[in-house]
Image (spheres, rainbow, N blue to C red):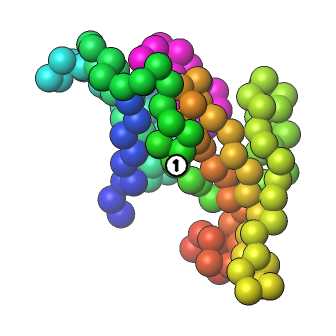
Amino acid sequence: MNAAHFMIQVRDLDRAVAFYEKALRFVEVDRHRYDGATLVYLRGRGSPFEIELIAPDDWPYAERPEPGRSHIAFTVSHLEGEWERLQCIGIGAGQITRHAANGVHQTRYFYFADPEGNQIEFLEAHGRYAGEEEK
């Protein structure tokens, strides 16, 4: 299986790395320079997900990203447990919300943001959002 790869531009690389290690329990696997930027690769332990944090030498964007400019979504087996874990480590997650389409329950989810304002969504692994082990 190929890894899912997400690219996120950040201004404060060390703060972003610390956040993703804490919030998503990812680990840094590589760091190097390329084309006027420092790149850091983080991977989930035993998962196919990889995040590439890109810190350009010259920040080409507004002071903060537009809300939702970068959006990453992950399915989780225990939504309430993840919400509580984030609260306990000082990461304020939004309200758990139910999503229904045409009156049929699809999943539940919540959002939180990284230090740059990029959105991260945790969805309950349910229905079409279930992983292979939960079908």
**How many numbered marks are there?**
1
Q: Residue at x 74, y 51 (%)?
A: 110
Disc 1 element:
strand
Name the quarter where the N terminus is drawn: bottom left
Side of 8 where 126 appears, left or right: right
Magenta run includes residue 23: yes
Q: Amino acid at mark 1?
A: Ile
Q: Position of residue 116 (x, y in %)?
A: 53, 25
Q: What residue is shown with label 1?
A: 72
Magenta run includes residue 3: no
Side of 113 where 97 appears, left or right: right
Q: Is residue 118 visible?
A: yes
Q: Residue at x 63, y 35 (%)?
A: 113
Quarter residue 60 falls in? top left
Name the quarter where the C terminus is drawn: bottom right
Q: Which residues are magenta?
A: 10-25
Q: Position of residue 49 (x, y in %)?
A: 45, 48
The residue closer to the viewer here, 72 or 40, is 72
Side of 96 where 35 appears, left or right: left
Q: Position of residue 52 (x, y in %)?
A: 36, 35
The residue closer to the viewer here, 81 or 69, is 69
Q: Is residue 27 visible?
A: no
- Type of secondary structure dominating the magenta stretch: helix
